[in-house]
Image: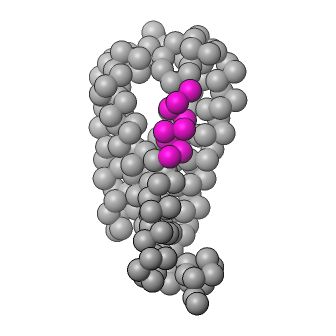
Amino acid sequence: MLTPMIIISILVSPLVIGFARSRMTNHPFDVKKYACWGLGGAFVFFFIGHLAQTEGMVAMLPPWVPYRLTLVYLTGMLELVVAIGLFVPQWQARAAAAAIAMLVVFFPANVYSAFNHVGLGGHQWGPVYLWIRTPLQLIIIGWAYFLCMRRQSSATDRQQLGLNT
């Protein structure tokens, strides 16, 4: 059950560090930049998981899915591409949209693995794991949409956070 906490930590850490930096240096705090960096870090973590835990990822797919191992590697590479895009300002909105699409498309694999007690990161707990995984998935999707896609980087972040003193 450590995986969801790691993911949340990766998401939030750049925001916390960026906020602290802006307070110490009196520089503007760019929420979008740090939020996208956090999401990018999470997708790097997902990519590493595809390489380091390949067998567990393959087990998360139903046996009738063809080329399961190839799919695990391809989806891992897609996650890396999305992660890179989240670190490049011109690509952030598109990368966040791709992240949302991937999270939605991949979610059935999480449901399958939870109901079949296979895979990684708590799926062995069975369907009860979905009580943790589903809100986490929604948090990541909301993060991508509201902080990386819709949000414009702006100087008003300082005003909204009460930093104009």
Residue name at image x 41 percent, y 80 percent: 25
| Side (left or right) of 25 relative to 110 | left
User: Residue at the spot x=54%, y=69% of the render?
Assistant: 151
Q: Nearer the viewer, residue 97 or 164?
A: 164
Q: Residue 33: within the magenta?
A: no
- Viewer can see residue 82: no
Q: Determine which quarter of the picture holds residue 73.
A: top left
Q: Say which quarter of the image contains residue 108.
A: top right
Q: Looking at the image, is 133 positioned above or below residue 146?
A: above
**Position of the C terminus by quadrant:** bottom right
| Residue 142 placement (x, y as % from top left) | 60, 53
Q: Is residue 97 above or below residue 163?
A: above
Q: Is residue 63 above or below residue 94?
A: above
Taking 52 as reference, is 56 above or below it? above
Q: Residue at x 51, y 54 (%)?
A: 12
The range drawn in magenta is 1-9
Q: Nearer the viewer, residue 68 or 26?
A: 26
The one nearer the camera, 74 or 34, is 34
Depth order, front residue of 67/69: 69
Give the image location of residue 154, x and y in percent: 50, 80
Residue 31, can we see it? yes
User: If the image is split into quadrants, where does the N terminus sit?
Assistant: top right
